[in-house]
């Protein structure tokens, strides 16, 4: 039986070939696209479980491809790029990416991040599946649906998992390390920058003012607290 499908979108033939071989040896089914345009089309055709996306491509760049994919699908997107500056990572996460890995990278690290992305996409809390309410915000865990004032909010798998983790700990202060460990895994406990980007994206989508928040409250130097109606 074939494993999860990984779509590799990269204009470099050597990268595509190397990833096809290495990931195939790990049991994944690998689909390849040499451009942003073909990558967007391939999502419809292949319905991948994870997308590995290069940023610097001729024609449609990775950022535009990421935005188009995210507008229609919630599939996890891991950016692979030689551009490792902080602003490049911020732009990719703003465009809807779930993770960012700078080239050159180790295959073990890439496979570990793919496993994390697959866990995010498949995660469903055990036991009963609650509905969390906070003002106009409704989080229906059973249906994996988030609405604000009746309008559905489209979250990435990572954003959804952070939001439901915070909601499940209603009223409690959870540290940066607790959220990173629960959502990304123990290897991410020191990456508070990644968590800050995700929280910023959640606030933007939930229209939650960080100065006068309704849902996501910052505990300076410690972590976050979420408010759910009693």
Image (spheres, rainbow, N blue to C red):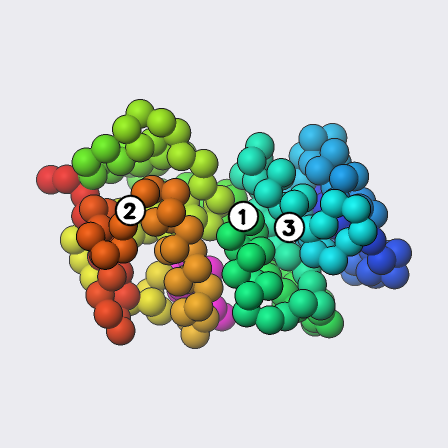
SS class, disc 3? helix
Residue 204 location in percent, x, y? Answer: 38, 47
Query: Looking at the image, which residue is at 62% across and 55% down?
Result: 78
Q: Which mark is residue 128?
A: none
Residue 108 location in percent, x, y? Answer: 67, 68
Q: CA distance from mark 1 to mark 2?
A: 18 Å
Question: According to the image, label 2 marks what residue?
Answer: 208
Q: Is residue 137 magenta?
A: no
* Viewer-closest of 114 and 96: 96
Q: CA distance from mark 1 to mark 3?
A: 9 Å
Q: Which residues are magenta?
A: 180-188
> CB of mark 1 within 8 Å of CB of mark 3?
no
Query: Looking at the image, which residue is at 28% across and 28% down?
Result: 149
Q: Residue furthest left?
A: 230
Q: Which mark is residue 63?
A: 3
- Label 3 vs 2, first from the N-terminus: 3
């Amino acid at each position: 039986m074939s494993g999860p499908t990984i779509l590799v979108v990269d204009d470099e033939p050597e990268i595509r070939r190397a990833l096809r071989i290495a990931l195939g040896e790990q049991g994944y089914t690998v689909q390849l696209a040499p451009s942003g345009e073909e990558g967007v089309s391939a999502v419809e055709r292949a319905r991948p479980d994870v997308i590995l996306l290069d940023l610097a491509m001729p024609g449609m760049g990775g950022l535009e491809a990421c935005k188009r994919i995210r507008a229609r699908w919630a599939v996890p997107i891991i950016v692979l790029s030689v551009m490792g500056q902080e602003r490049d990572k911020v732009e990719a996460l703003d465009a809807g990416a779930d993770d960012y890995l700078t080239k050159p990278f180790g295959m073990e690290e890439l496979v570990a991040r793919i496993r994390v992305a697959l866990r995010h996409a498949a995660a469903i809390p055990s036991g009963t599946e609650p509905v969390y309410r906070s003002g106009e915000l409704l989080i229906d865990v059973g249906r994996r649906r988030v609405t604000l004032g009746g309008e559905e909010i489209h979250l990435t798998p990572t954003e959804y998992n952070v939001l439901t983790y915070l909601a499940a700990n209603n009223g409690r202060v959870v540290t940066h390390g607790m959220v990173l460990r629960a959502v990304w895994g123990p290897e991410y406990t020191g990456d508070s920058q990644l968590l800050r980007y995700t929280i910023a994206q959640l606030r933007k989508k939930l229209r939650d003012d960080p100065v006068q928040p309704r849902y996501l409250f910052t505990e300076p130097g410690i972590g976050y607290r979420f408010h759910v109606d009693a």
